[in-house]
Amino acid sequence: MTPLVELQITDIAFGGSGVARLDGKAVFVPFTIDGERVSAKVVRDKKQCAEAELVEVLEPSQDRTEPQCPYFGVCGGCVYQHISYEHQLELKSRQVADVLRRLGKLPDLPMRPIVRSPDSYGYRNRITVHAQNGVIGFYRRDSHTLIDITHCPISCREVNEKLAEVRSRRVRDGHYSLRAHDGARVFEQTNDAVADALRELVASFFPGRGALLIDAFCGAGFFTKRLAGNFDRVVGIEWDRFAVDAARRNAAANHTYIHGNVDVELAALLQNASTTDVAVLVDPPAVGLSTATRDTLLAFAPATVVYVSCNPATLARDLGQLRNGYQIVSVTPLDMFPQTSEIEVAVHLQHNQATARAG
Ligand SMILES: C[S@@+](CC[C@H](N)C(=O)[O-])C[C@H]1O[C@@H](n2cnc3c(N)ncnc32)[C@H](O)[C@@H]1O
């Protein structure tokens, strides 16, 4: 039988597990909080680190709180429901700074306060549930077996109504995307209130009027449409045909949308632009920017780059390279996904030559 160990949790790593030290080795313990003393069972012992399962909280943190979801701990979705919302915000802010310093080798970070979600539950405007042999729900943590879910407390009312509706039918095995908003089935930000705050934050990076904004990875034009008034011309690039069609609907005269790959189209656009008055907004998927796109930004040197990221690790890698031409003006974490380990970050960068010109 695996012996129990007593551990002092000193931090919470990106991903959500508490971190302790045992004989000099890092031990990761999910569902614990920094400052707690716990007893745990080591379930995986590797060369560099170990993983343990929480058995008992011996000295609880004052930030320990009651999870609102009966599936918490079993379901693979949320990792922070046992932590007060205020402390979740502190942790996420710290994790972003930590990951950028460690992986991006970026020591002096102009961090701004994290943008909180007005609702820490009931905010998700879409979920994907899976159906198999009459079970409808989410996958278990660390496994591919399904748990039957009747209600998801982090999702909004409309999504839960759609879940109830799917459950009331005999649906075929498969994946079901449940959305609060009707419309094209294209990428959509997950938390309406924080998405609005993100869009306003990005708009605040462009107080004057610019010549050209390139919105790479533009989706259905979420940022483009808001920013069009700040620029003479805005061009979106997106490879999802349905998103481009949606973006082109109601587009003003100064918007253009290119259906294509950012890796190819961004270089082509920058080649023909005077880069001293060009801003590029990148909002890539979790994999971050390709080497080709990073090289394009450094080679053509648009004056301003705004990087919106849903993955601090790939953001750190990309900023680590972009700092060879760019200065980081600000880093703002946003809590788009309360109760989960996911973090959104907006970074404002200015090319060194543009900074020198402004000075
Ligand atoms: C994180 S979403 C952002 C969408 C949009 N900015 C928004 O806020 O709604 C990333 C988008 O990039 C698109 N995408 C991913 N890789 C791409 C590529 N190499 N070229 C063009 N579009 C890409 C995806 O289809 C998706 O719509």
Image (tube, grey):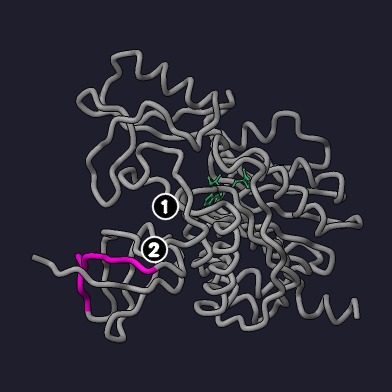
For label 2, being within 8 Å of ligand 1 is answered: no
Q: Amino acid at mark 1?
A: Val
**Callout 2 amino acid:** Ser
Picture quadrant of residue 51 = bottom left
Left or right: residue 116 compared with residue 226: left
Q: Quadrant of the C terminus?
A: bottom right
Image coordinates for residue 286, horizontal then vertical, percent: 49, 56
**Dividing the picture into quarters, in which one does residue 174 lie?**
top left
- Residue 263 tag number: none
Tag 1, which secondary structure? loop
Q: Position of residue 282 (x, y in %)?
A: 64, 57
Q: Magenta residues: mostly which secondary structure? A: strand
Please name the residue shown 21% across and 65% down the image: 41
Residue 334 vs residue 305, the one in the foreground = 334
Total marks shown come to: 2
Which residue is the extreme one toward the bottom?
Answer: 24
Would residue 5 appear left or right of 88 to someone viewing this image? left
Q: Residue furthest left?
A: 1
Q: Position of residue 168 (x, y in %)?
A: 35, 14
Mark 2 lies on a secondary structure that is loop
Quadrant including the N terminus: bottom left
Residue highlighted by disc 2 = 17
CB atoms at circles 1 and 2 under 8 Å apart?
A: yes
Q: Is residue 228 above or below residue 270?
A: above
Q: Quadrant of residue 157?
A: top right
Q: What residue is drawn where x is 28% and y is 72%?
A: 6
State whether residue 264 appears in this view: no
Residue 79 is labelled as 1
Where does the magenta region start and end?
A: 37-46
